[in-house]
Amino acid sequence: MKTIVIATHNSHKVDEIRAILDGFQLLSLDEFPEAPGVVEDANTFVGNATKKAVELARWLYVAFPPTRHSSPLFVLADDSGLEVDALGGAPGVRSARFSAPESARSGNMPDAENNAKLLQLLKDVPLDKRRARFQCVMALVLVPEPKTTSASPVCYADEFEVQTFDGTCEGRIGFEPRGKKGFGYDPLFLPVGLEETFAELGEKAKNKLSHRAKALEKLKDYFKSKEPKPKASFDSL
C-alpha cells in the first residue's frame, strides 16, 4: 500500500481527502509535528502547492529515509481558493487570509472574518454579477530512493518530480451564510444549478461536485495509469 503524507494541518481538508481517496495509507502533518512550516508566497495555486510538496518531501527524505518505511512514500499538497469575477479574481491565493492585512504572506484568518469581508465587498453586486469558482491544485511528489556515492546516500534536487492535478467548481456567491456542514467559504458558495450552498449540501454531495474532488479524481487516474497491466492468460484468449 502506498503512503501519502498530506501537507496540511487543516482537519477539514484531510477529512475530505480521506473520504475521496481510498486504497492508500493517508497521514497528515499532525503526525509530523517537527515538519518545517512553508510560507505560501507564490502568486498561483500551482506555485504554492508545488512549493509545499517539494519542501516537505525534502524534509521527509532526511527525517524518514526509505529504510524507515516499507511502502512508497508520497507527499500531497493542496492549494485552493475562491475566485470572484466581480473582484477581479480575488481573493484567489489569499483566500485563507483574505481579511488579513495585504502585507500578510502567511497565517490563516477565521472563516467568519473572511466571509464577512467578502459579503461587504459584494454588498451592492446583484446576483447575476456574483459569479465565482473554487479552484484547486494538488501537487504530488514521490520521496525518492537515495543514491549511494562513496557509501553515503545522497539525493539531488531534480529527483523531486512533481505531478499536478487541478479541479474547478463554478458557482456564485450568496447574500448571506447558509448551512453549517462546510468550512471556509462553503456557507456562501452556491454551485451552478443548485440552490443549496456547499455548507447545506453536506459531505457526500459536496465530494461529488467540489474542486478538490475533481483534482483527486485526476490523481486517482494517474495512479491507475501507473499500475502494471495484467498479462493475458490462456483462458482469456
Image (cartoon, rainbow, N blue to C red):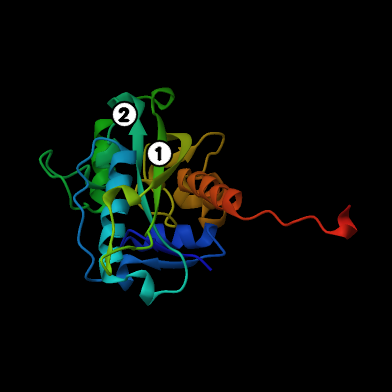
- For label 2, the residue is 89
Point 41% across, 61% down: residue: 14
Camera-side residue of 82 and 55: 55
Are the two marked residues, 1 and 2, in contact with CB atoms closer than 8 angstroms? no
Point 28% across, 70% down: residue: 151
The image quarter in which residue 55 lies = bottom left
Q: Is residue 11 visible?
A: yes
- For label 1, the residue is 135
Residue 42 picture location, percent across and down: 23, 39
Is 70 on the left or on the right of 184, as rendered? right
The crowding category of the residue bearing disc 1, from other C-alpha atoms within 10 Å (few below 14, some 14 to 19, many at least 20), is: many
Q: Is residue 181 above or below residue 50?
A: below
Q: Earlier in the sequence, mark 1 or mark 2?
A: 2
Residue 146 picture location, percent across and down: 34, 63
The crowding category of the residue bearing disc 2, from other C-alpha atoms within 10 Å (few below 14, some 14 to 19, many at least 20), is: few
The image quarter in which residue 104 lies = top left
Q: Is residue 124 visible?
A: no
Kind of element beneath mark 2: loop
Residue at far front of view? 150
Q: Amino acid at mark 1?
A: Gln
Residue 84 picture location, percent across and down: 34, 31
Is 15 on the left or on the right of 97, as rendered? right
Camera-side residue of 236 and 171: 236
